[in-house]
Amino acid sequence: SRWKLLQLGLDEEYKRLNDVRNRQKTSNASNASSSVTSQDFLSVAVAYPWARAVSHNKVPYYINHQTETTHWDHPDMVSLFKSLTEFNSVRFSAYRTAMKLREVQKTLSLQNLNLNAAIEAFDAHGLRGQNDKLLDISDMITVLSSLYETILTSSSPPTQQIQPSINVPLCLDLTLNWLLNIYD
């Protein structure tokens, strides 16, 4: 049936992503003497003077080498939070909240994610509506990677404009940072 084909396709894509990540780990391990974490590919999500680091409990933080300070929030997330204050002048709270959430959605490129594809991706990772499963950071990165892979591989109908290229490591890192802020 169609449902089985979709599940098989998602399972194959999940395996492919894990293979790519494992190959990346292997090549990085052979090139570096230190141990490689599953978050290493996200280090390209920040530009100088910023650097991305990971705490002992796998939570990312950001180092500004110019000011020699550390921050829990991604520098672009701080900019996003500051830009959301422009909506504070909207009179009605429902509209104000909707506008802020839409801005977050566009910044994270989640407007390109089809809801059915998101549900299928969550199902493929065993995350259903009535689930009490706790996710650690690496699980969150795996699920977010498959969501952004879905966004990249989904083809837009010919009537729509072609979406600009998505910086997946940046969007993934920002989404992770946003989720950690929400559930902290």
Image (cartoon, rainbow, N blue to C red):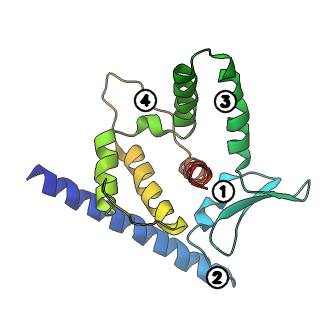
Disc 2 is placed on an element classified as loop
The circle on residue 35 is: 2
| Three-letter code, disc 1 | Val
The residue lying toward the viewer, choosing from 171 and 180, is 180
Mark sitting earlier along the chain (4/3): 3
Q: Position of residue 164 (x, y in %)?
A: 51, 34
Residue at left offset 34%, top offset 47%: 118
* Tag 4 and tag 3, C-beta contact below 8 Å: no
Disc 4 is placed on an element classified as loop
Residue corresponding to mark 3: 84
Q: Is residue 153 above or below residue 60?
A: above
Crowding near pointer 1: few (<14 within 10 Å), some, many (20+)?
some
Measured Cα–Cα span from mark 1 to mark 4: 25 Å
Crowding near pointer 4: few (<14 within 10 Å), some, many (20+)?
few
The nearer-to-camera label among 4 and 3 is: 3
Mark sitting earlier along the chain (2/1): 2
Q: Position of residue 115 (x, y in %)?
A: 33, 40
Mark sitting earlier along the chain (1/3): 1
The circle on residue 162 is: 4
Residue corresponding to mark 1: 44
The nearer-to-camera label among 4 and 2 is: 2
Residue at left offset 46%, top offset 55%: 144
| Three-letter code, disc 4 | Ile
Q: Where's the C terminus, which quadrant?
A: bottom right
The residue lying toward the viewer, choosing from 172 and 70, is 70
Q: Position of residue 95 (x, y in %)?
A: 53, 20
